[in-house]
Amino acid sequence: TFNQIYNIIKIWGLFNYEISISGTLPANPLWTFRVRINDDFIARGTIDDPLSPDADVTYSNRVELSYNASPVFQFFFDDISNSSIEQGCLLIVKPYRFETGATHFFNENGIFEGRVKSDKTLYITFDGTPWTTTPIGGTGHSYPIAGRGKMTDDGTNYNVTAMVYTHVDGTMPYYTCTLGSGESYYTLAYIAQIASPNYSTALWGWSDSAKNDRVCSFAFNAFGNYGYFNSIQGFVCDGMPDASDCPEDSRYPSGAAVSTLYTNMANTAQEFSAASITSPGVAFLTFD
């Protein structure tokens, strides 16, 4: 739907003018849209920018889709074909509303925010217990409530860090120990080479205190760190370099580099503070 709206604006050359458009989608009158082109919008204090958390961010163009008068999609941008221009872009979306069929993977209250900054840094933040299933753990003992991910592009590698705030009920699946009901944190760092086959090295931890490199009471390297992946085989092996079937491989990013990435995540207070993870406050913006 967004692509259709964007293509119409582009084909008609409307990006050259200051334009305000709104209407109803013909296929379903419950769906409405609003478009503002070359009409500066100030996102005041809505972006958690680690360099300036309360900075005003101005976007030239914006699109909103609503269902039954409630926003479900907002996209703010300067140039959709080039995120490096000026402020990059910002997306806020409720995936539930875009699912089809009777079975939903996403929770109706789940909301995601994605931002690409001008330096090619990507931030993704979610809130509202977005999944109806349990992608972390997989057996019903845990579910993600909120979280944040960050990806940078250094020209050679994608450097990714993520932290997810979860609720745990009793014993974690796969591990015969109890983290304790309530707060739990899943943390991940990996480096993926940009060039195919995208050799990647990953490191993870899970504990009942944020950024603790342990699973239950065991040192986390006993539970599969480091892991190797690539785009041809997918998962290759884990336990590197201690596991006999996962020796160190110079084609992959080094474990030391991934450990540094992981440690830097733990030490970046504004990006991965307790408040920004447990209550990120993702919400739709006032469009006008």
Image (tube, rainbow, N blue to C red):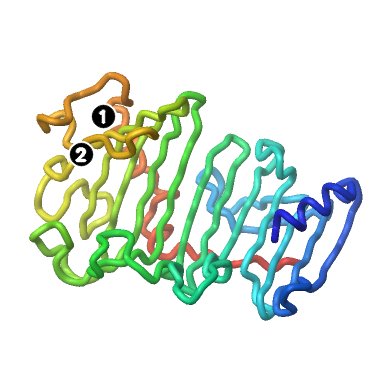
Nearest the viewer among 7 and 45 is 7
**Amino acid at dot 1:** Gly
Instruction: Pinpoint residue 168: horizontal percent, then vertical percent.
Output: 23, 68
SS at circle 2: loop
Residue drawn at x 78%, y 51% as measured from the top left: 7
* Above or below 260: residue 267: below
Q: Which residue is mark 1?
A: 255
Instruction: Pinpoint residue 213: horizontal percent, then vertical percent.
Output: 21, 46
Residue drawn at x 33%, y 38% as measured from the top left: 234
Find the distance from the CA under tag 2 to the CA under tag 1: 9 Å
- Residue 264 shown left or right of residue 62 in the figure: left
**Amino acid at dot 2:** Asn
Residue drawn at x 10%, y 49% as measured from the top left: 218
SS at circle 1: helix
Crowdedness of circle 2 by 10 Å Cα count: few (<14), some, many (20+)? many
Marks 2 and 1, the one that precedes in the sequence? 2
Instruction: Pinpoint residue 57: horizontal percent, then vertical percent.
Output: 67, 50
Nearest the viewer among 273 and 127 is 127
- Residue 270 shown left or right of residue 179 in the figure: right
Nearest the viewer among 184 and 169 is 169
Q: Quadrant of the N terminus?
A: bottom right
Crowdedness of circle 1 by 10 Å Cα count: few (<14), some, many (20+)? many
Q: Which mark is residue 225?
A: 2
Q: Looking at the image, do the residues carrying marks 2 and 1 touch, with CB atoms under 8 Å apart?
A: yes
Q: Residue furthest top?
A: 250
Instruction: Pinpoint residue 144: horizontal percent, then vertical percent.
Output: 35, 64
Residue drawn at x 58%, y 54% as measured from the top left: 47
Q: Quadrant of the C terminus?
A: bottom right
